[in-house]
Image: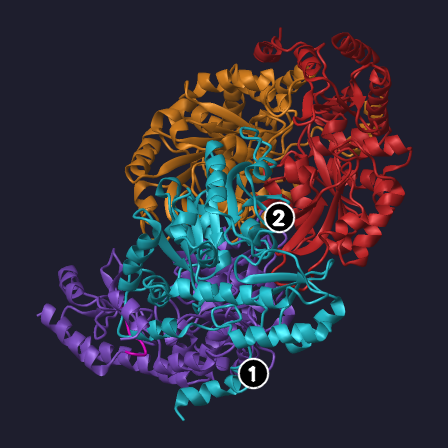
Chain colours: A purple, B cyan, C orange, D red
Amino acid sequence: MTPAETSATAAARRHDPDVRGFASDNYAGVHPEVLAAIALANNGHQVSYGEDVYTEHLQEVFQAHFGPRAQAFPVFNGTGANVVALQAVTERWEAVICAETAHIHVDECGAPEKMGGLKLLTVPTEAGKLTPELIDRQAWGWGDQHRSQPRVVSIAESTELGTVYTADELAEICRHAHDHGMLVHLDGSRLANAAASLGVPMRALSTDVGVDIMSFGGTKNGLMFGEAVVVLNPDVVRGVEYVRKMSMQLGSKMRFMSVQFEALLAGDLWLRNASHANAMAARLSAAVADIPGVELTRPAQSNAVFAILPREATERLQKRFRFYTWNEGTGEVRWMTSFDTTEADIDTFAAAVREELA
Amino acid sequence: MTPAETSATAAARRHDPDVRGFASDNYAGVHPEVLAAIALANNGHQVSYGEDVYTEHLQEVFQAHFGPRAQAFPVFNGTGANVVALQAVTERWEAVICAETAHIHVDECGAPEKMGGLKLLTVPTEAGKLTPELIDRQAWGWGDQHRSQPRVVSIAESTELGTVYTADELAEICRHAHDHGMLVHLDGSRLANAAASLGVPMRALSTDVGVDIMSFGGTKNGLMFGEAVVVLNPDVVRGVEYVRKMSMQLGSKMRFMSVQFEALLAGDLWLRNASHANAMAARLSAAVADIPGVELTRPAQSNAVFAILPREATERLQKRFRFYTWNEGTGEVRWMTSFDTTEADIDTFAAAVREELA
Amino acid sequence: MTPAETSATAAARRHDPDVRGFASDNYAGVHPEVLAAIALANNGHQVSYGEDVYTEHLQEVFQAHFGPRAQAFPVFNGTGANVVALQAVTERWEAVICAETAHIHVDECGAPEKMGGLKLLTVPTEAGKLTPELIDRQAWGWGDQHRSQPRVVSIAESTELGTVYTADELAEICRHAHDHGMLVHLDGSRLANAAASLGVPMRALSTDVGVDIMSFGGTKNGLMFGEAVVVLNPDVVRGVEYVRKMSMQLGSKMRFMSVQFEALLAGDLWLRNASHANAMAARLSAAVADIPGVELTRPAQSNAVFAILPREATERLQKRFRFYTWNEGTGEVRWMTSFDTTEADIDTFAAAVREELA
Amino acid sequence: MTPAETSATAAARRHDPDVRGFASDNYAGVHPEVLAAIALANNGHQVSYGEDVYTEHLQEVFQAHFGPRAQAFPVFNGTGANVVALQAVTERWEAVICAETAHIHVDECGAPEKMGGLKLLTVPTEAGKLTPELIDRQAWGWGDQHRSQPRVVSIAESTELGTVYTADELAEICRHAHDHGMLVHLDGSRLANAAASLGVPMRALSTDVGVDIMSFGGTKNGLMFGEAVVVLNPDVVRGVEYVRKMSMQLGSKMRFMSVQFEALLAGDLWLRNASHANAMAARLSAAVADIPGVELTRPAQSNAVFAILPREATERLQKRFRFYTWNEGTGEVRWMTSFDTTEADIDTFAAAVREELA
């Protein structure tokens, strides 16, 4: 037994490697190809803070997906990506329009406000998706010194509710925003799932529709850690490098972030992982659709299934499988799949749902 | 060739694994035992955001080093650790006293001020080390509403200048701070090097002398990424979990941070790595001490060697080896060693110095 | 002609002293008794920054209204009062629940977020008034590190929509907030109008119902400038003096703020002014109620009248009198009265409304 | 007795209008011509928040002094003026170079950092005055993402230490800053005193030497309250209106701020007040210069006299007259004069100094 095995065993012994649940796609580990890429990069010295050859090469990798103007800035996590990106396209007095279910509003402990000094102007939506009409509820008051000036529309693809915008819907939002002098930020922590769902390249949902800046997610699609701020329209973005550093998002051994993205994006791993997770969600959706007492509440367009079932059934199921109640009020639950979910996982779980509702 | 090798090869091909320099300890990669531990943890699902078994176990690991009251909160990087830790021990209107050479003042792009709203009160020092007398230059004005209230003394062990405080010096600083109602934050991004240098356990330089909260470094001592905010005196600290999240420092797949720390700290890897890096610095210091034209400017107490040499010699050397000029004014350079520096690296470099100065 | 008359005449000549409108109570000037009090205080020297005898005496004045524990901190304006008060009762990671029509949300250019780092959690309301049920839509998630922790319920009395909470309604809100470990902030920029409307002392709507901290308004009730942060429950408030200074709200010649409040509050000027403004709103409401085409949209409970009338009529009226369209969508307008509105002003205006709608 | 007299008497009775001291120029009240101007403006309604005729006219008043491109934005106090001005000329990641004795650094409770997110880079100076050489100690590191980017040089005229820059010295600083791509902010809370001291118009020390933006002081020169952010180079300034509002510095009844500035600046009141205060400082300096035991420490170039005298003498004097010890270490005291200081005040005080030192 090597020293590493010894020292790491204490915790690993408490960890059953065969248990997988449906709580979140970030409960999964690292895809083996990503881990292998990390190991390949672990030799000798590389300049720190992003001047390494992996990060240099990463620009080509991102440009192959998002066009020749794309610039990628690896950061640590999704909250970091969002707050860095939004600061880089706003003046101090500007505001961001988003859905009231947006991750930046409900899941980041106030980071946009507290770290970025960003005012969020929220809008209620049907299923996490903004429209020009919904944006207009907050898009007003330019020139009025009393109103934090709306400058960015922030949308997520796919959304927090597992829904997916079509390319046309995104284009319409971008056109509307630009017509009003606003920019568009896309929270793409699950952009790969949306692209896989729609069967289009990722640029069809970002660069091509007019998105200005993007948070691109890797962690939920098989990386160990790492997201990227991706500038799509460099004309409207200022100071990303400084904002990243002052926002505590500059990694020193950045090669290990960049090589993960290379492993994900240089080939088709991003698509394989996302398609698989989506397929598992579809399989689950299909498997439980006809169970009496299960009401599917939203279309399973990416890697999440939302359903309402009786609370007691939920409680019994949660003793056997890990997943979250999404809405305490209605009893709606969320089941997420990931790149490592197996067909057997789905079948076992669907059988358990059927059992607990019998 | 596996798909991972294929996809990651593009950048890796530009990367010569045999090149190592003296620019920074974060130019090095990951220690093999750490990478092995990561691989061990990469199975099945673990609860995200720190409720995994690795992070749970990590508390015992840190407590073995820093005493039973220690609480460890993994974060992404050193700037994040510093800004989270300082926020957790200050009210909005309070200030931090530090050396004018402190990392938080000169190397974090204003993160303490811009993200934490922290006022830094700086003091010039001899070699990066504060003393009670130096602290007193800024420790005044309590109760005066016009003065941001001094609340924390922030010191680094080892310092940015490679110097090391003795345990007695640290105890004196802590006593002085506490006598004035202030707390002590220790930037321990290289605490292992200091402990190795002094031949004492790390708690002798932190818990035992009265440090209240600490940024504990892993990246510079062989981890891939990851630092930890370590609370040593829980009585004076509030809300670390929330501050960490709102400061964009909460990792989702935290098991991969925690297991690295376990690999480093459960056995003696921390000490082996730090001792080796220190020994390489000492070897370098000894090897160049008698070279005419080389003036060693500070004692090599940890893993850094500072020297002044003629600018032309520096320029020629920098074409062959990567390292930084520390002070443009005096021509002082910094040579850093790391866990992976070899004796041959030192001997080759020392020979080159001798050659360029001949 | 004295030099002062000369120098100030240039602008004053453009100013018709007989024109009064219905746009806002802050279009009015200073009540003559307040101006007289300022002149009385303008002699010799007084210690600056609040250690003057006027500010010292002011504590007694406020305590006579709000009870023996009340502490008053004069600040410059209402936004300042709100942002200082809210910072003084929150940790960095905490959030404030308010109506989506709250002044702090819609009219302060993001000051709470951008200066105070405060996350606002908004709720749609019927007429600007929160209820326990509405509060509960945002009052959840304590202990969840991803959620900015709800800590304060902020209400306005009277509200932005001119409605007034009864003492019972306020007590119920305070009880509900306290039961959930939250505090209550009252934006009392028009508290005098509410008290006059209900015929109760101001403490019946603040101290007695359990409000913890208050922004108390003077400017809209006849002062030249000045609001006050009034601490009602000192046990839950920290560092107001420092927060006030660092929030740029500490006046140097504070005697001139304090003596204005003394003029307002030591006698019954606060009540005379507020009652008069309210009476003028009631007179206006009554005078236009039966005009065909005028739909009164809210009860005139304080000094504002809200009505919907045909847009062309509004446009014609706005050429003759200054007032604001409140809701561009519905055509709802707001008519505000102030301490200096005369019965003739009302009658003239009501006649004009009748005329334009004929 | 009118109601106003009654209500305001309580505090006024504790106020001896004949007592004047030497603590600060903001211990003084309001100049009678300013108060008269306020009364003149107190009629009828004016649009709030700066759209009144007084504020409109104020632009001409400021342009007469500072040139046709000058734009004045009244704010409440000096800290507000500084923090608004500095935000309006910096990106989020930029820094401000200033003397370590600067008001923004030592006397604003961290407002620049905590409200503006501004990093201050301080330099020790001889007598509060920067020079190109001193600026260069912090003016470096552009393009380095780890360094908050130096963007503004902030100087004060006159300085916190009562010293005065010549026009040539200011021009040299501005040229140096501009040559390095930096801007110049002038804290002109006592600009009138400097201009009076040098016998030049104020624009000779601001617009004409290349200052980009200025905090212009009124309170210390006879106003009740009010400073102004004055933009001198509109090309480099963004969003002042929004920054002012979000920084809680937008007054509603702004006519009462603007008319004060008009009273001060439309004629020569600014100069009469400043010249008088300066003359009184010179008279005091002369009167005590030969007293054994009094060491004048700085030239009395504006309205402050600095001296070292024996501590016991200081303590005895402070029982009779109010003034501050400036430096506890050396025993240096500061005596300030103001527009209302009389020759008799000076003579009485000088006699007392002589007496206590006898």
- Identity of the residue drawn at 71% across and 54% down: D151
Residue at image point 65% right, 40% down: D105
Say if residue A111 shows up in the picture: yes
Q: Magenta part of the protein: which range?
A: A335-340
Percent across and percent down for residue A105 are: 42, 57
* 3D distance between C-alphas at marks 2 and 1: 40 Å
Kindly identify which residue carries mark 1.
A60
Q: Amino acid at mark 2?
A: Glu
Residue drawn at 59 percent across, 23 percent down = C50
Q: Give SS at disc 1.
A: helix
Q: Nearer the viewer, residue B200 or D186?
A: B200
Q: Are marks 2 and 1 on the same chain?
A: no
Q: Quadrant of the N terminus of chain C?
A: top right
- Write down the chain letter for disc 1: A
- Residue C247 seen: no
C52 relative to D128 in the view: left or right = left
Q: Secondary structure at mark 2?
A: loop
Q: Is residue C146 above or below residue B211?
A: below
Q: Is residue B92 left or right of residue A234?
A: left
Residue extending farthest left = A358
The outermost residue toward the right is D199
Residue at 85%, 41% (x, y): give it: D205
Percent from the top left, x then y, of residue C322?
63, 40
Q: Is residue D356 above or below residue D189?
A: above
User: Which residue is labeled 2 in the image?
Assistant: B100
Q: Main secondary structure of the magenta part?
A: loop
